[in-house]
Structure formats: C-alpha cells, structure tokens
Amino acid sequence: MARKAKRDLTMEEQLARGPLDLPFLMLVLLLLGIGLVMLFSASYYTAFRDSTKPVLNNPYYYIQHQAAYAMAGLVGMYIVSRINYQHFRWMAPLALIASIGLLVLCYIPGLNAPINGVRRWLRVFLVAGPTFQPSEIAKVTVVLFFSARLCKRDTEKQLRFTRRTGTGRMLNFLEKIGFLELVPYGVVLVVVLGLVVFEPHVSGALLVAVGAAAVLLVSGISLWWFIGIGGFGAALVGLMYVTTDYVKYKIGIWLDPWGADAQSGGYQFRQGIYSIASGGLLGRGLGQSDQKYGFVPEPENDMIFSIVVEELGLVGAFMILLLFSLLILRGYWLALHARDKFGTLTIVGIITLLAAQVFLNISVITGMIPNTGISLPFFSYGGTALMIQLAEIGMVLSISRQIPAPRKD
C-alpha cells in the first residue's frame, strides 16, 4: 500500500513555525545564566548555616533547586513558544477564572500553605509538594485577558441608549467618556487586586495593576483616566498613611532608615547599602562578598542585587542592568512589529511586568522607594516564579515567530 502523503501546512501553521527572535532569546539565556551563578554565590553560606528541613546544612540546596526549575522552565518556554499564540485568545478567560480560583484557595485553611502568617502560597498538589504564589499566575492571566478583549476595541460599535430618559442620557454620556468600556476591566481588577492585597501581598497587587495599566494605555484608553486613577491611588496611599499604623511604619522607615529603628526595620536597607558601597568600581570578586555571611537578610532573594554589586562592582552591576535594558527594549521592538494588535498588547503587558519588577527591586535596594518585597527576575530564588517568567518569555517568542519578514526591494 502506498504511503499516505503528508498534509500540506496551512498558512496559519506556517506562520506559527517561523524563526524565534534570537536576540531576545540570547539575552534571556545570558541573564538566566548570570543569575544562577550569582544565586549560588549569594546563597551557599545561608544554606550551609540552615539546619532546618528541607535545607539541612546543604550549601548547594538553593542552586540545585533553582537549576532544576530553570531547566524545567526552559523546556516549558520552548513548548509555549511552539504554540500558535492565537490560541491564547480563547484560553485567556479560562486562565483568568482558574487564577482567581487559585487565589480564593489561599484563604481556605488546610488547602493554603501560609508562611509567617501570610496566605500567599499554595502547594502544587494542595496537600504536598513545593509551594507557589497564585498571584504570579494572576499577573499574566490578567494581561492575556485584557489583551484578548482590547484587541477588538477598534472594531466594536459604540453603545447607544435612548435620549428620552435621564438614565439613557446619562448612559450615553458615560459611554462617550469611555466609562462603560472600562467597567468589565474594573470589575476584574477589583476582584483580583482585592484577593491579592488581603493575602496580604501589596507588591503583587501593584504588579498586577501595572501590567493591566500598560495594556489599557497602549490599547488607546484615554490618558485622563490614568491621571484620575493615579490621583485617586495617591490619595488612598495618603489616607492609609494617616489611618494605618503598618503603612505609616513602612514609610517612616523609608524616610529615615538610619534613625532609632534602624536596627529592626531599617536593618535590611542599611546592610544592603553597606554591601553596595563596599563593592567599589570593580567589586571584591565573584564569591568574595563579606555581607552575605549573615549580615544582609535574604541575600538569595530580594536583596541579591546588593551582593551582585559587592562582588562585581559598579561596572558589573551596570552591565547586568544594560542586559535587562536591552531585553526590555527588544521586547518593545517585538511588540511594535507584532502581526496583530493582540500580539502587541500581550508583549507590552509581559515586558512591562518584567521592567517593573527590575525597577522596583533596584529602587528598594537603593532606597528610592519603600520596601515592596519584589524579587529580581532570573536572579532571585523562587522556582515556580522563575518557571512562570520563562513561560511568559515563551509567549513573547511565540508571537515573534509570526512577525512579518522585511520586504526585499
């Protein structure tokens, strides 16, 4: 019997099998490699002194786990990059519902995995296995959902209501200024941000809001709405400062980290600054940090960049920030050249999340903003967070496959 001929690929399948954007991919791999090296340097003493389970004084504990997650994340990134990103449109609402369900589980005793009284984590198998933060998933699902809806914004007809009644005239006015268009997005944000904030995880809520705002802004929503909402947010922070002791305490430490409370609330910032200052121009050398020996709290996590500066110096820190800058700029370049608006909005949301994390982490370490507890992408310890970040990179690479090739005149 003659062998059956292979089916010809459709145009959509051919587009989905285009080449990956190599500059973007190489920047990601370079940052990931440097991040793993610096994580090992920053974490081995902390792990060696930790006799609790599951570390048990194993100096390789953090790097072994992070490397394993990195390998799994790279495999996931490759698989996601091979998926036609158009499928993400219909997946977006389902993914958003699933992420909200996971956030709800964080409030159910017995199913959540609270750490120090904070309900941010779930176990992978709910009752056993490694932990993860559902807010990490919520960040990207909100971006996908907003992108999938807003990419159709230019083709949707404006709503019209009767002018014979006061209600109808009011609704027409609200539609004209764009308020009614924002209602479904506002509802989604209120639900997601509310669940994240009260875990409590204010920094996670901030990132969700930043990613959503980036997609809304690029889709063409009026800038005046952002100015108004930004003013409302600033007023809310001011109100919280006046009425909430915790917020007042955090901002007070930020304004005066060298004051009377420096040995408790300001201790982390002070040790991080000492670490940065001792690095000088060229640094002490890889593995030669003094501050990671029990001085800088969590050197393998939020404060890892202070160890990077101490060991690699100002020059090394500048080179790492340059790599991040090139990655972010390349991401926005891919957004500008994406095949359609859905691809553009998705990349803008993902890259803005990455840029915001880098900016906020460095700003906290250098004292530009109050402590937010945001990790540094590709560097800070956190296996599931790293896997999700690499999956997001896979989405960007999937979109890059379908960027039209430049014409040859």
Image: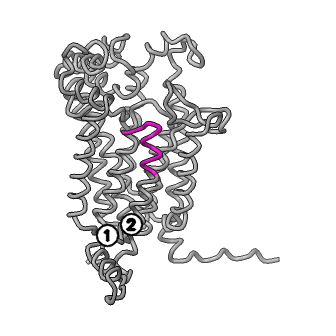
Quickly name the residue at label 2: 183
Q: Residue 158, relative to residue 40: is it above or below?
A: below
Q: Which residue is nearer to you in this view: 265 or 124?
A: 265
Say which mark, if any, is on residue 179: 1
Q: Residue 339, relative to residue 113: is it above or below?
A: below
The picture quadrant where one finds residue 110 is top right
For the record, the magenta segment spans 192-202
Left of 189 or right of it: where is 221?
A: left
Percent x, y for residue 24?
Answer: 35, 51
Where the C terminus falls, by quadrant? Answer: bottom left
Please tell me whether mark 2 sits on a helix, a strand or a loop.
helix
The picture quadrant where one finds residue 37 is top left
User: Looking at the image, do the residues carrying marks 2 and 1 touch, with CB atoms under 8 Å apart?
Assistant: yes
Q: How many marks?
A: 2
Name the dominant secondary structure of the magenta segment.
Answer: helix
The amino acid at mark 1 is: Phe
Where the N terminus falls, by quadrant? Answer: bottom right
Please tell me whether mark 1 sits on a helix, a strand or a loop.
helix
**Identity of the residue drawn at 47% across and 33% down:** 382
Q: Which residue is nearer to you in this view: 323 or 180?
A: 180
Residue 23 visible in image:
no
